[in-house]
Amino acid sequence: MNTMDIQQVMQYLPHRYPFLLIDRVLDWELDKHIVALKNVTMNEPFFQGHFPQHPVMPGVLILEAMAQAAAVLSFRSSGAKPGEDGIVYFAGIDGARFKRPVVPGDQLIIRAELLRNMRGVWKYKARAEVAGELAAEAELMAALRKP
């Protein structure tokens, strides 16, 4: 099983606090899949306004966490690192669905499976789960581009 701690994750993502949404990679296989973890805490800055009386992680940030996990796999699979060889940008989101709220105290498990890679454009099937229950899913497209 391949794992990555936060220091290793930061080598493959240009994001930093408060926008780094992956805490650890639990498993990955080049050109195949990745499983990542996001610990959701009350200290997240977005909970101050979304929503103060009933904190819920915004769906767009769940999608962003799924995209960050996919970007780690894209960089690892291509042998590139952010800044050196380019940056991975969102190119598309299809079929996004939200099934349950993600709240402080949840552990978000993100799974992304590579569907195809053509000329630096990756397509992933991604899902985010809490305690084995589907929270969100989408197909994501990402492209490696020079900055």
Image: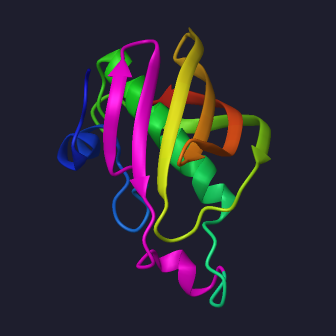
Q: Is residue 38 within the magenta segment?
A: yes
Q: Residue at x 49, y 61 (%)?
A: 106
Displayed quadrant of residue 66: top right
Q: Total number of numbered labels?
A: 0
Q: Depth check: give the residue in front, 130 or 72.
A: 130
Q: Is residue 28 within the magenta segment?
A: yes
Residue 123: % across, % down:
62, 21
| Residue 62 appears in the picture as rendered | yes
- Pick out the residue farthest to the bottom: 53
Q: Depth check: give the residue in front, 135 or 142.
A: 135
Residue 82: % across, % down:
33, 37
Residue 57: % across, % down:
60, 66
Q: Where are the magenta residues, as a range? A: 22-50
Residue 36: % across, % down:
41, 39
Location of the C terminus (image quadrant): top left
| Residue 82 appears in the picture as rendered | no
Displayed quadrant of residue 46: bottom right
Q: Residue at x 53, y 28 (%)?
A: 112
